[in-house]
Amino acid sequence: MTKIALAIHGGCGVMPEGSMTPEEWEGARRDLAAALRAGYTRLQAGDSAVDAVEAAVVVMEDSQHFNAGHGAALNENGVHELDASIMDGTTLEAGAISASRAIRNPIKAARTLMEDGRAVYLTGPAADRFAEAKGLQIEPQSYFTTLKRVEALEAMKRHAADGTEGTENEKHGTVGAVALDAAGHLAAATSTGGYNNKPDGRVGDSPVIGAGTYARDGVCAVSGTGKGEFFIRYVVGHEIASRMAYLKQDIATATEGLINHDLAPHQIGAGLVAIDAQGIAVAPYNTPGMFRGWVTPEGKGFVATHERVYEIEL
Ligand code: ASP
């Protein structure tokens, strides 16, 4: 059995520490820890990296703290349109759902589509119909709505009217996971409500294979968060894998290169989690904080929102 490892993020749309109460931060860390445990338990049981990333993402989709599933962002019309994707690094099979208005756990629909195999991408009402036909849970729009996102949409509309800049938290967020399983396989998964006040029908990077999500055995698995248009233009996930495969960069160099060099001139919020074939995980970001967590190949678990890192019981 090779080593197992896992890393998750709950988005880089995180406020400066003083702007939320310690209890609120604690609540977010608790849900990060639950997501980490959900994924790690699967890896420990000998299940696949795909199983682990899906399990971790489902917990974060169900949490109100993160912009995915329940608690997702609202678009310019006050509607939730959800994007998600999953990729198996062994077969390079992938499944992605975009602009779903009703799937409780979009990551489950992405996985089901990957296994169905007839398409990589399904979008809009067809994605919702596919999920329903496959027996996945369907919800009314109200299930996804939280007060925090309603306020963020109002704030973003105000910023648009006065030409001011929104905070990272008002703007966006996403959840994602990457894993190395006991058989040495890699997988990645990402799920998001996208941007608050995003245009009707806008699809971000999270469901775009190679941009917000990418996995390739022997190289790396990547899940991104940040202004999706730039992740799509730079094909961030695949670019990191290419630099590692062709330039022989290590995972820290390849990911820092993208976040701190290539994306830096665009002055956008950006972050990601990535893991290499040995289970080394990194979580670079350029915003005040990023919800994140990881389990090392030695079996130690950690969660963090800002610089301070907390060790957790697994
Ligand atoms: N990447 C997501 C999107 O553009 C948003 C985020 O991660 O903050 O849809």
Image (cartoon, rainbow, N blue to C red):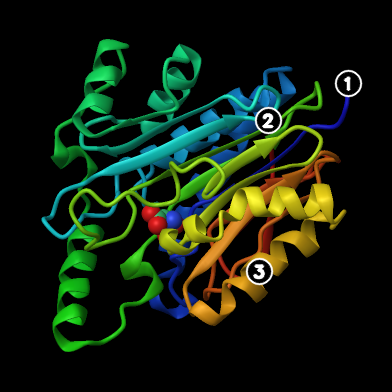
> Marks 2 and 3: which is nearer the front?
2
Along the line of sight, which residue is nearer the eye, 91 or 177?
A: 91
In-image side of 113 versus 81 (left or right): right
Residue 143 in the image: above or below residue 270: above
Q: Residue at x 71, y 67 (%)?
A: 256
Could you tell me the amino acid type at mark 1? Met
> Marks 1 and 2: which is nearer the front?
2
Q: Are marks 1 and 2 in contact (CB under 8 Å)?
A: no
Q: What residue is shown with label 3?
A: 308
Along the line of sight, which residue is nearer the eye, 26 or 233?
A: 233
Could you tell me the amino acid type at mark 2? Gly
Quadrant the C terminus occupies:
top right
Report the Cα–Cα distance between label 1 and label 2.
18 Å
Q: Earlier in the sequence, mark 2 or mark 3?
A: 2
Query: x, y percentage for residue 46?
Result: 74, 17
Report the Cα–Cα distance between label 3 and label 1.
32 Å
Q: Residue at x 83, y 40 (%)?
A: 297
Secondary structure at badge 2 equals loop
Report the Cα–Cα distance between label 2 and label 3.
31 Å
Residue 150 in view, yes or no:
yes
Q: What residue is shown with label 1?
A: 1
Secondary structure at badge 1 equals loop
Query: x, y percentage for residue 287?
Result: 52, 74
Q: Is mark 3 within 8 Å of ligand 1?
A: no
Secondary structure at badge 3 equals loop
Residue 26 in view, yes or no:
no
Could you tell me the amino acid type at mark 3? Arg
Q: What residue is shown with label 2?
A: 89
Q: Are marks 3 and 1 in contact (CB under 8 Å)?
A: no
Query: x, y percentage for residue 110?
Result: 43, 27
Label 3 packing within 10 angstroms: few (<14), some (14-19), many (20+): few
Q: Quadrant of residue 158?
A: bottom left
